[in-house]
Image (spheres, grey):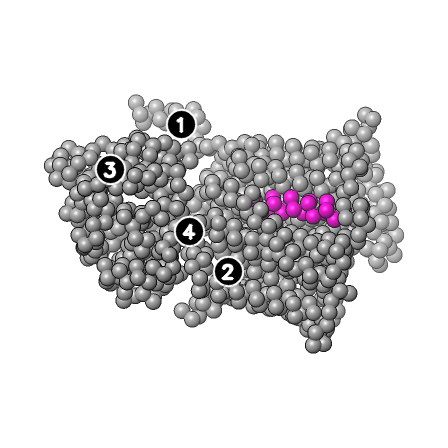
Amino acid sequence: MGGQWLLFSVDLLALFGIYLALNLSLRLQLGYTGIANFGLVLAFTGGAYVGGWLPIRLGMWLVEVDPSLAEDMIWNNVIIASQVDLSLQGAPFTAMTILLLTLLAAGAAGALLGLLSGYPAVRLGGDYLAISLLAFGEVLAIIGNNYDPVVGGPLGVRIPDVWAWAGDWRFMAASLANCVLALGVWMYLNSVERSPLGRVLRAIRDNSDAAASLGKNVARIRLNVIVAGGIICGLAGAMYTLYTTGVAPSALSRFDWTFLPWVMVIFGGSGSNVGVLIGTFVFILVQKLIITYKFALSFLPFDPVWLQFLLMGLVLILVLNFRPSGLVTEKASYALGRREMAKAAGKEGL
Amino acid sequence: MASFIDALTYSALLGLMGFGLTLIRRTTGVWNVAHGEVVTIGAYVALTATSFLSHSPYFFLPLAFIVCAAVSGIIFLAGIEPIRAKGASSMLLLVVTIAISLITIAAINIYADYLQNVFHLASKNFLFARFDFTLWGQMGILWSAWAALGALTVSYYLMLQHTRLGLALRALAEQPALAIVMGANVKALSFLSWCLAGGAAGLAGCLFPMRFQCHPGVGTSMIATMFAVSIFGGIEKMYGPLFAGLVLGFAQIYGIDLISSWIGPGVIPFKDLIPMIVLLLTLQFLPEGLSGFVGRRRG
Amino acid sequence: MSQLLRVQDLNAGYGAIHVLFDINLECDQGQAVAIVGPNGSGKTTFLNSIFRLADIFSGRVVLDGKEIQREKAHRITSYGIGYLRQEGNVFPGLTVEENLKMGAFNLPGKEVKERMDEVLSLIKPVEVFLRRTAGTLSGGEREMVALAAALMCRPKLLLLDEPTSGLSPIASAQIAELVKNLKDKTHLSMLVIEQNLKIMFDIVDKCYLLVSGRMIFSGQPEELQSDRELMRTYLGLS
């Protein structure tokens, strides 16, 4: 029983880390800059595809694997992955090299996808931008499902486990790594918040014309933000793949990786990092509980998974109706700290 | 020839779906993401009615129209209007329609599960081609889809141009506050538009399984294509979706055949990318869509 | 002269924002009443609140003996009030003729043509560009179209929100001439917001001074003009 709870919490932690990173990416784009990115799934999928494509090839190159298997990587991927796993169990440094290289490539893929989807979109007004990004989000799913060499088509592929060396602590290590990613994004956002850049972003969000008239290149800055958001999403996608040691295009849905993050961010409050954190935690917990206790609802004449959709939709509507700014609202941020402000005011005023 | 007919049929259905999106955007300024699910509901009305009442699905077109008009109207009254009345931006309303879309996806799937588990219907995958009739050597669906789209577009166009209600709808699309001041009941007009849009989607949904496989996610999976139709057609004129439906329908079915005959059959699975490409090109180079372009040329 | 509009202890604003405090105002049949005051004092909000485009928190709005403060926004015009808004005052994509027809939305269908002829005889310049699209007109022409459209509903009371704002002196004078002409010929009652006091003091019978959401003066235009303190402090004139 205790083991089950441990597994539950570790998996919760892992998903929490991934989603928090993803949601903070949305917070950067929507909350700071007012970009309604309905294509989060695009860069996330890009990162996940990199995670599905690269580690197994790196693994074959770095450790001893029967080279004849490489003739059909997709067909033989389970055998190759388990052979690489065996070698990685005793080679944490090799495993971490694979991890780092994969993250690097995933970040680059995310940036590239952000650039590709953002470039045509940033000049469009509010909801047209949203629809443009929404449409873009579908592109990789169509390619992944139909072009087998990427990640094996709809069935997906299995990949080597870069956490294999941690043995029994494998899931714990992977979960913590996910949270480290989220923490990194959190710190990045915090530093943006207090910087002049943060104020420029909010200015663009609140009145892009006024910001442009003050000499800010609005389209360029928006594009930069989408690219930065894409990098974060790409990293999250790769980390997710490395955590689950598998990737299938069908599991990278618009619902899970665009709409769900939106619900969490709107619920928690797109104007606050803490709000996003709370929103993420609450929804991950609810989702895990529904999945875990699915069997208890088996008397229903339908799949209880749909209750989750129902719940998300209802919560979103209620929040938008009664508390559109979310659970935690945006706080005014000051260029100077309180003490400096008082000092400056004291000098001027008295 | 078969793919030509397929393309024609598909075009009409796309036009019907895009019609509703355009109508809603024009009159209420909302991009309705839940429109795809309304189409699916139309298909399920057809499935339910044909299974339990054993008539041709054509027989239930009016029923699908009414049910989907009601669903769309309820979506407006219960979901959109309360938030719109508080002065929400079109962006926020887009998020509202996504929330509604999640709820309707759940409802449709629960209903489909229920039909399957309790009545043992093949509700996860259905096709009614066997019910279709033949007229002048072609499947009935071709004629009926075009009849529905043509009748709807022409009658709506006449209504817009020649009635006071139409005038009010056009006025509402331009300056809602001024339209109110002049006595137009904005809520009622918007409600009417949503109902009509839902009805059109219902017709499309009811006709869709006559030729194409349907499943609980059929409308959801087509929403990006519907947006492509609506935006490519341009929201300025109501004939936009009809033309855009033709272009996209042919591009997707006939065009991919053509391309694969040059390049090879490898490209066929990627036919779903065509609407996205059209959508992105439109937003980039023709942001007002076809009708805006035509309107601008004429001055 | 009988009383047409009476506003009693009106408190209004937008949502949680309280803009107007205990406003009282009266307007008799055939009278032209001006509301003056600095920017942001709540003049437009006052007209909007009569039309329920702003929220009324308390107080009464009585038109011709009927209380209308609880009516829905789109019903107000059927009580006989026309409203010329400052911004977005025409439908740019419709022709001028369609704009006028839209103005008569509440009239029975068969009366529209007749009313349009009446309005065109009052505002003659509009007849020339009846077939043009409203969006292609100049500011002054647009203002005339808007004025004509506001008259289409056979109003007893006309609300005018800065009819000359943003117009050249010539166009302003033209509009002022039309308004004056309208008042003399039709005995229509008017509530006018206007920054251009010189033009207006000739036309109006009564003045209200609105400052920070409160009425601090009411009386004859001459009285206001002679009160140098008020004129200087709030209207920047001496």
Q: Which residue is mark 3?
A: C26
Q: Where does label 1 land, which residue?
A: A341
Badge 4: residue crowd in 10 Å (few <14, some 14–19, many ≥20): many
Residue plotted at (30% across, 41% down) = C63
Coordinates of residue A299 in the picture (x, y in percent): 80, 37
Element carrying mark 2: loop
Residue that badge 4 annotates: B184
Instruction: Determine the CA span between mark 4 and mark 1.
Output: 52 Å
Marks 3 and 2: CB-CB under 8 Å? no
- The residue closer to the viewer here, C60 or A138, is C60
Residue at mark 1: chain: A
Are labels 3 and 1 assigned to the same chain? no
Choose between B120 and A217: the one closer to the eye: B120
Parent chain of label 2: B
Q: What span is in magenta?
A: B96-112
Q: Residues within 10 Å of mark 1 (few under 14, many from 20)?
A: few
Q: Give, as a three-letter code, the residue at label 4.
A: Ala
- In the rendered view, would you say B169 is above or below C75? below
Q: Can residue A190 be seen in this snapshot?
A: no
The residue sitting at 33% across, 34% down in the picture is C60
Q: Amino acid at mark 3?
A: Glu
- Seen from the viewer's position, the closer of residues A331 and A57 is A331
